[in-house]
Image (cartoon, rainbow, N blue to C red):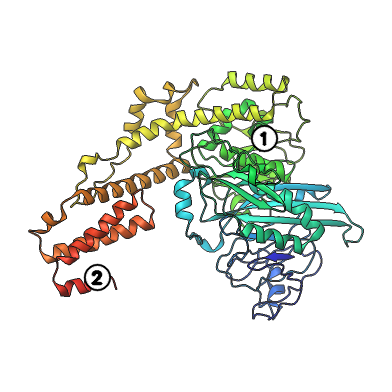
Amino acid sequence: MEFWNGWVGRDLRAPPVPPLPWQGHLPLSQGATSPSVMPGLGTARDPEAAPAARACPPCQGKAFSYSSISLFLPIFLPFPLCSPFWISLVSAPSLPIPCRVSPWPPPIVLEPFAVTVPVSLAGGLGDTQFSFRLRQAGGSRSSPFQDDGRYNREAPVTLQREAAHYFGYVYFRQVKDSSMRRGYFQKSLVLVSRLPYVNLFQCLLQLIAPEYFDKLEPCLEAVCNEIDQWPPPVPGQTLNLPVMGVVIQVRIPSRVDKPGSSPVKQCNQENLLPAPLVLPSVHELDLFRCFQPVLIHIQMLWELMLLGEPMVVMAPSPTMSSEMVLALTSCLAPLRYCCDFRPYFTIHDSEFKEYTTRTQAPPNIVVGVTNPFFIKTLQHWPHILRVGEPRMSGDLPKQVKVKKLAKLKTLDTKPGIYTSYKTFLHKDKTLIKRLLKGIQRKRPSEVQSALLRRHLLELTQSFIIPLEHYMASLMPLQRAITPWKNPPQIRPFCQEDFMKSLEHAGPQLTCVLKGDWLGLYRRFFKSPNFDGWFRQRHREMTQKLEALHLEAICEADIVAWMKDKSEVEIVDLVLKLREKLVRARCQHLPVKEETLQRVGLYIDTIIGSLPEDLQTVLHHP
């Protein structure tokens, strides 16, 4: 396994120089199937695997194993080789070879993940691409990048970096090769990033992976050096990203963009030879292609995602599985999907027991799987979407039916939505007819996707705008903010008051769909998506109050206030103002730099009015 984790071109099959105390080969027998991980990062999931690890003195149990279908990697993220703004790790696993632990100190550790040979492709040949998502191990939620706060403040909520999860993008190749012991060449190239830019990274893999499979380390070393020179992603900017003689031109979406429209405008092409490869979007999937077999049920799927319901997506390939899960979680935009989701999940993932247990209710998560084994282990989940093989381009897709969960069979399960869920809203039959007619007329998939995305956007906005209006009414009036008192508190969210407001300002004013909107809101209040939305809006409003309070302080007459105040009160004001300045800069509050500078000058003015002994104490060292 070649593992680029802090330096270039290091083949970990070669003896490390110098050896570190916790390095060593893992003595694995062929066909070992039980994964174990390093102490402190997890425990062996097979009790029989632990003694084998302990029997290796050089490793002292710090090892990981592989199976015949997948490679388990405890991922270490040190000072990264590639630009940390874009890619956290580049891995090129292959089967079957002994693995070494990366000899670099591991400040950040991810859960082990299985990505090398997808189960559903065990008998297929060719190339395939898919994505996965995994949590950071050890309960750590801190972000290693200082610019995360600035990026997340300016990026749409759906594209913010996550402190607790990583995205993995995989390019897998399997071809016959008589020179290999198994008779097949099996290799993957994996990019791990905190950014959910699925289109960009899959495009990048299409350029890199074929060359890497032919030229191996030198090619990957050169690519990593190029990526290291990329500028950081700045929301609202169009960037030219050179790699392997190609310039990828992308626009990083911004929070201030008008929803539903963020085209890439080509710029500076006269200086770019050859012409750039323009990506219309770094993240948007072809929604129409993903949802083709379930178009008539798009309303139901939108509601299930809105309510954060547990769902299993069973697909014939990792590509279809990951794309369907990502499409489902993106259909709420611009509302963020706040539940967990796993585009490609296997029986070897560390959460397998957690998700398959019957002793508690299924978690709020969307899981994409390909292994038929999950039909049995997850049949107690309330919603299961079974997707069949894709049809030829241009064919009228056969729409799956809604079926009872009791009809879910262990073997030969037919495509369908297995659920007992009853929708709150009626279907938009006009949209469905328009999309199906577009298929008959061979309307381009891009146009079909635009129609579908616009419908979902308008539906989400119709639902969320009344919530936004009510939340804004809880904000204290600006005249209630005075410089010498703490900012007033945001009034509490009262569900009953909100429900009453829907009579004259509800979604029926902007959406043609009829149904039980009140029932949908009541169910939404119990979901993780409402909790995530409310916490984010409350945090933004609190920061706005802090910013308005700083502005009020700048407009006040500090000298007049100090005339009748004691030294204790004045010193207390200095300490509070300094605390506000630190918080404003650390939290990137929406305050002008000019305002912060004026507050700093006020602090100096106040300190200058105090006795010299206090000035010495209060002045910065």
Left or right of 302 in this view: 19: right
Residue located at (10% from left, 64% from top): 566
Mark 1 highlights which residue?
290
Q: Picture coordinates of residue 572 (x, y %)?
A: 19, 63
- Contact between marks 2 and 1 (CB within 8 A): the answer is no
Q: Residues within 10 Å of mark 1 (few under 14, many from 20)?
A: many
Q: Picture coordinates of residue 144 (x, y %)?
A: 51, 62
Determine whether 514 is above or below 387 in the image.
Answer: above
Determine whether 356 is above or below 320 in the image.
Answer: below
Q: Picture coordinates of residue 405 (x, y %)?
A: 64, 35
Left or right of 503 in this view: 299: right
* Quarter occupied by residue 267: top right
Q: Residues within 10 Å of mark 2 (few under 14, many from 20)?
A: few
Mark 2 highlights which residue?
619
Res 343 visible: no
Residue 33 circle label: none
Task: Please count the marks in the image.
Answer: 2
Residue located at (65% from left, 39% from top): 324
Taking depth in this image into account, of 617 and 426 the one nearest to the observer is 617
- Helix, strand or loop for disc 2: loop
Residue type pointed to by label 1 = Cys
* Quarter occupied by residue 300: top right
Q: Picture coordinates of residue 557 (x, y %)?
A: 15, 52
Residue type pointed to by label 2 = His
Taking depth in this image into account, of 518 and 150 the one nearest to the observer is 150
Compare marks 2 and 1 and give the one earlier in the sequence. Answer: 1
Left or right of 412 in this view: 106: left
- Quarter that holds the C terminus: bottom left
